[in-house]
Image (tube, rainbow, N blue to C red):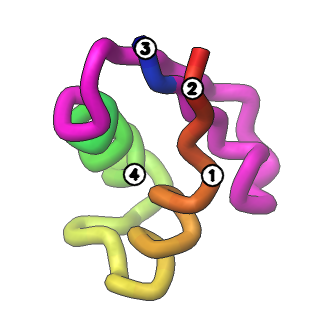
Amino acid sequence: MAKGFACSDVGVDCDWSTSAETEDELMAQITEHAKEHGFDPIPADLVEKVKAAIKDK
């Protein structure tokens, strides 16, 4: 089952969203996008929030 995530799901004022077949693929996309927000790497507390916001599609 595909997974999905949107920045707005963790309270960021951003309309970016993505989906992938696995959580690992999704996290790779999120990690790349997070650099646009100045997160490189993503802080551990934010990784937890992001993983909690991932939804099955």
Task: Tell me, yes or no, whether the two marked residues, 1 and 4, touch with CB atoms within 8 Å.
Answer: no
Task: Tell me, yes or no, whether the two marked residues, 2 and 3, touch with CB atoms within 8 Å.
Answer: yes
**First in sequence: mark 2 vs mark 4:** 4
Characterize the local packing of mark 2: few (<14), some (14-19) or many (20 or more) Cα atoms within 10 angstroms. some
Q: What amino acid is labelled 3 in the image?
A: Ala
Q: What amino acid is labelled 2 in the image?
A: Asp
Residue in the picture at 35% in, 16% down: 20
Front disc: 3 or 1: 3
- Give the distance between the C-alpha atoms of the residues marked 1 and 2, in whole angstroms: 10 Å
Q: Which residue is mark 1?
A: 53
Q: Which residue is mark 2?
A: 56
- Give the distance between the C-alpha atoms of the residues marked 3 and 1, in whole angstroms: 14 Å
Task: Tell me, yes or no, whether the two marked residues, 4 and 3, touch with CB atoms within 8 Å.
Answer: no
Front disc: 1 or 4: 1
**First in sequence: mark 3 vs mark 1:** 3
Front disc: 1 or 2: 2
Q: Which residue is mark 4?
A: 34
- Give the distance between the C-alpha atoms of the residues marked 1 and 4, in whole angstroms: 15 Å
Q: What amino acid is labelled 1 in the image?
A: Ala
Q: Which residue is mark 3?
A: 2
Determine the secondary structure under disc 2.
strand
**First in sequence: mark 1 vs mark 4:** 4
Relative placement, left or right, of 7 versus 50 is right
Report the magenta residues as a range: 4-25
Task: Tell me, yes or no, whether the two marked residues, 3 and 1, touch with CB atoms within 8 Å.
Answer: no
